C-alpha cells in the first residue's frame, strides 16, 4: 500500500485525528487486548495499520493527533516518531468514540481556535490514496460551510458487515445530503440498498469544524460538551490528571454515529462525499485474506517461516509460525499460529472468531 | 487398556513374534520415519502400542521375539526391558512382512526346533484381552494340526479400510476353514460381505508351526526359504553380519498375505479363528479418536497442556501442545500440534493424511 503521494500539500487549517482503539477481536490470536489490531503489520508490508493511517493523513493536515488508551500510548508514540507528545492524547479508559473525538475537538479548538478536523480510524486499509486525498479535500470544503461530512464508501457488493449511509440531494461536485444512517442490514435489505445506488458504506470517517461538532454536542450531549471543554482547559497545564479524574468518568459512553451523525442527519446537517477508495476494514481473517496475494496454488500464506502444504483446501489461509503446517480437506481453512495460541476456523466462520478469547477464558474457569 | 490377566499361563512351546515396522504415515506428524507409530503412547495410557502388544502376548508365550528395523532396535529394546538381546531381531532394511516373519521362524526353529509361532503386529489395540487369549489358544491348537491359522476380527460394520477373510466350513469349536482372503472392498462389496456373516477383518495375525511356514515357503517362495535358513544358521554366531550382507538383499519384498495366506488358503491350508476382540488398528486420527473418551462437550483432547475451546465443531479432536487452541465452525476437526509440525484436517479426511509428509517435502523442493 502506498501512502499519500509525496507531492500532496497540507490543507490549511485542517487537523487529522486518528482514534486508535478497539482490540479487533475477530483477528484473535493476532490481536489481543495488549496488542490491538491497529498496532499490527497485518499485511506484512513493513507498516502497521496505525502507521499506514498516519502515512495517509499526515501529508494532508497541518496537525495530526492520535487518541488512544493510556495502556497503548507508549506503543503508539513509539510507532509514530513524527508525532510530538502533545499529538498523542491518552484516555484513562475506553468511553467509546464520541468521547474520544469530542476530547480531540476540544483540545484542538483550545490550542488553535475553531478548525476543521477529520476523524479517521487507525485500523482500516485504503488502497487508493489519491481518491482518499480528493475525498478529504472535498469533505473539508463542505465542512467549512457548517456541515458534518462523512466519506461514504462506494459499495462493492451487498455486505451485511457494515452500516450504510443513505444519500439525498446533491450538495456540490460529488457531495450529497445524508438522508439517514442505517445499522448493519440483513442480506435482503443490503441487496435492496445496493440496487438503489443511493447507499454507501459507513466507514466512520467524519470531517467537521470543531465549533460545529461542539455546538451539536451542547444540544445533543451537553454532558460530553461540558466535560471535554473542562478537560481541554486543563489539558496542557498541571491540572490534566485532576481534570481527568473529575470529568472523564462522567462522559456518556456512546458512538459518534448515535450521538451526532444520526440526529444531525435527521436535521439535514450531514453531508456525504462518496468515494471509491478500495477500502477494507480488515474486520476478520476473511477480509484480511482478500487483501493478500495468494500463492500459485491459491493458498494465502502470511508471516510464515515454515513450509505450508495443502490438499483439498482451496483458499486456505495460514498465518504465522515456523513449523511445517499441513491442511487437508478443509476448503477456506484459516489457521493462525501466533506463537502463544492457535486458531483453526474457516473463512466462512471468520466473524465468529470474536468469541475466541471468551471461549478460552470459559475453558480456563 | 488392561494387559492379559496375570493368571494367564504360557502356552507350552509357543513363541510370540511381534513385527514392529511401518511408520503409520496417516498419523503424521505424531508418527515419523524416526518415531514410528508403534513407539508412541497414542492413547495416553502410559504404555506405547509396542509395550501394550508385549503386555498382551508375553504372558501367553514361552518365547517372545520382536523383529524391527535396525534404526529402531535400540528404542525397541529400551521400551521392552524384559526382552534379552537375542529376543530383538534387527533388519538392516525393510523387506516387507514375509521376510521379517520368515526370518523369525527360521531363527526360532534353529534355536528351539520346530515350534508354533504367532505373529502379532506391534501397532494394534485390543480391548478384550481375555477374548484375545482364548483366540490365541485355539489358534495354537489348530496350528499344531499343520494349518496356517489367522485370527479373524468380527466386523463391527462394513469398513472399506480392511481386507476381509472369507470363512468356509467348520474346523473346531469356533475355527473354520478359510475360503479366501480379499483386498479392501468398495462400500457396496463391504455391505454384501457383512450381510453374509461369513467375512471377518484381516488383522494380519497368523499362527502356525515354523516347519509348516518354512515348508510352504520352500514351494511358494524358495528364495526366501533359502535366504532365511542361511541367515538363521549364522544368526547366533560371528557370521551374522556377513550373512546379512549376502542374503538380506536377495529376499523378495512381499507381504505374508500374498506370499503365504492367499495361495495356501487356495490349497485349503488356512484356518480362521473368529473373535470379538474390540480391535482397532489405530490407522488414522479418526480411528484413534474412536478409542478415546470425549470431554463433556464432545471434544476429544489428547496429550495437551493448553486450553482447548471449540464452537460449532462437534467431534473435534485436538492433540498435543501447550498453547490455547480455539476451533470454530469445523465439525470433526482434527488439529495435531506435535511441537515440530502442525496438521489441520477433519476426521472425514483422516485417511488422506498419509500424503502429509510428501506434501511437505514437495513444498520444500
Image (cartoon, coloured by chain):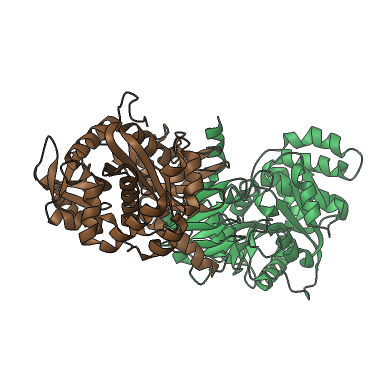
Chain colours: A green, B brown
- Residue plotted at (38% across, 57% down): B352
Residue B263 visible in image: yes
- Residue plotted at (75% across, 49% down): A67
Q: Is residue A140 above or below residue B102?
A: below
Question: Which is more toward the observer, B155 or B91?
Answer: B91
Q: Where in the figure is residue A221, as x and y percent of width and height?
A: 69, 41
Q: Where in the figure is residue A196, as x and y percent of width and height?
A: 46, 65
Question: Which is more toward the observer, B26 or B328?
Answer: B26
Residue B187 visible in image: no
Q: Where in the figure is residue B199, as x and y percent of width and height?
A: 16, 47
**Residue furthest out toward the right:** A238
Location of residue B273 (image quadrant): top left
Q: How many marks?
A: 0
- Residue plotted at (50% across, 50% down): A344
Location of residue B3 (image quadrant): top left
Q: Quadrant of the C terminus of chain B?
A: bottom right
Question: Which is more toward the observer, A289 or B39?
Answer: B39
Q: Where in the figure is residue A307, as x and y percent of width and height?
A: 55, 62
Q: Quadrant of the N terminus of chain B?
A: top left
Q: Is residue A143 above or below residue A73?
A: below
- Residue plotted at (15% across, 42% down): B145
Location of residue B132 (image quadrant): top left
Residue B234 relative to residue A169: left or right: left
Amino acid at each position: 500500500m502506498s501512502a499519500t503521494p509525496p507531492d500532496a500539500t497540507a490543507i490549511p487549517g485542517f487537523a487529522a485525528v486518528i482514534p486508535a482503539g478497539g482490540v479487533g477481536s475477530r483477528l484473535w490470536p493476532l490481536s489481543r487486548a495488549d496488542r490491538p489490531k491497529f498496532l499490527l503489520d497485518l499485511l506484512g508490508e513493513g507498516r502497521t495499520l496505525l502507521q499506514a493511517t498516519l502515512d495517509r493523513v499526515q501529508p494532508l493536515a497541518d496537525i495530526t493527533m492520535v487518541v488512544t488508551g493510556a495502556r497503548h500510548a507508549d506503543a503508539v508514540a513509539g510507532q509514530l516518531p513524527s508525532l510530538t507528545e502533545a499529538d498523542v492524547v491518552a484516555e484513562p479508559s475506553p468511553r467509546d468514540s464520541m468521547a474520544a473525538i469530542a476530547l480531540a475537538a476540544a483540545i484542538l479548538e483550545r490550542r488553535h481556535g475553531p478548525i476543521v478536523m477529520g476523524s479517521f480510524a487507525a485500523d482500516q486499509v485504503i488502497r487508493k490514496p489519491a481518491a482518499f486525498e480528493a475525498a478529504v479535500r472535498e469533505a473539508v470544503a463542505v465542512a467549512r460551510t457548517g456541515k458534518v461530512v462523512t466519506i461514504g464508501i462506494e459499495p462493492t457488493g451487498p455486505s451485511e458487515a457494515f452500516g450504510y449511509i443513505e444519500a439525498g440531494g446533491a450538495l456540490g461536485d460529488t457531495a450529497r445530503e445524508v438522508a439517514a444512517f442505517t445499522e448493519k442490514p440483513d442480506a435482503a435489505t443490503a441487496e435492496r440498498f445496493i440496487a438503489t445506488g443511493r447507499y454507501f458504506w459507513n466507514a466512520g470517517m467524519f470531517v467537521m469544524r470543531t465549533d460545529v461538532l461542539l455546538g451539536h454536542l451542547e444540544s445533543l450531549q451537553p454532558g460530553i460538551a461540558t466535560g471535554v471543554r473542562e478537560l481541554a482547559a486543563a489539558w496542557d497545564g498541571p491540572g490534566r490528571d485532576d481534570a481527568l479524574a473529575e470529568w472523564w468518568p462522567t462522559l456518556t459512553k456512546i458512538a459518534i454515529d448515535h450521538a451526532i451523525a444520526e440526529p444531525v442527519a435527521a436535521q439535514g446537517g450531514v453531508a456525504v462525499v462518496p468515494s471509491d477508495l478500495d477500502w477494507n476494514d480488515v474486520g476478520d481473517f476473511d477480509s484480511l485474506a482478500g487483501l493478500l496475494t495468494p500463492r500459485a496454488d491459491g493458498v494465502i500464506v502470511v508471516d510464515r517461516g515454515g513450509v505450508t502444504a495443502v490438499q483439498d483446501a482451496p483458499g486456505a489461509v495460514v498465518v504465522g509460525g515456523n513449523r511445517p503446517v499441513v491442511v487437508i480437506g478443509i476448503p477456506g481453512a484459516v489457521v493462525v499460529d501466533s506463537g502463544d495460541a492457535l486458531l483453526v476456523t474457516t473463512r466462512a466462520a471468520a466473524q465468529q472468531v470474536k468469541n475466541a478469547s471468551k471461549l478460552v477464558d470459559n475453558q480456563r474457569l
